[in-house]
Image (cartoon, rainbow, N blue to C red):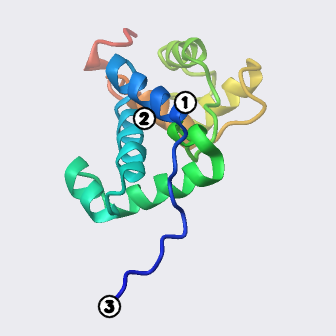
Amino acid sequence: MAMPKKKYVVELTAEEQSTLEQLLQRGKSRARKLTRARILLQADEGLTDEEIATGLNVSLATVERTRQRFVEENLEALDERPRPGGQRKLSGKQEAHLIAVACTPAPSGQSHWTLQLLAEKVVELGFAESIARESVRQVLKKTPLSRGCTSSGVCPR
């Protein structure tokens, strides 16, 4: 039984081949980029996707995806695409300020800072137009801070 013809065939020009080989010789790029370069070079040599995947210890899907991206985008296929997920709401300096605020005495009428109060304070300080309590929680989770315990040593009272 004959193998079905590949939909995305990699045919490198001499210039593209030279660029990929130089990239591999320098070795100063990210590992994923180097792996994609090796995939393209081996695909150009006529190796099957299975042989490439086995030889480079990557999944068959990675080989197929790299082949497709090269045909559609040329050598831009080597570069990382943006990853999903939103941008950070607070910079590192703003996070540090939030932590400092959490270490101050609670506002009058409150026994301690709540996540909602801290989120409101972030908006009041102009750090963000809006911020969820969960975002505040994640910032505070990175610290040894304990909002309810005075024995943590982080926030003297």
- Name the residue beneath numbered marker 2: 33
How busy is the neighbourhood of tag 1: few (under 14 within 10 Å), some, or many (20 plus)? few
**Residue at (51% x, 34% y) in the render:** 14
SS at mark 2?
helix
**Residue at (77% x, 20% y) in the render:** 126
- Earlier in the chain: of badge 2 and badge 3, it is 3
User: Marks 3/1: CA distance?
Assistant: 36 Å
Whether residue 92 sits left or right of residue 109 in the image: it is left
- Name the residue beneath numbered marker 1: 15
Q: Nearer the viewer, residue 65 or 110?
A: 65
User: Marks 1/2: CA distance?
Assistant: 18 Å
- Earlier in the chain: of badge 3 and badge 1, it is 3
Tell me, for residue 5, which label it has, or none: none
Indicate which label's residue lies in the foreground, 1 or 2: 1
The x, y position of residue 116, in whole percent, is 61, 38
The x, y position of residue 50, in whole percent, is 28, 64
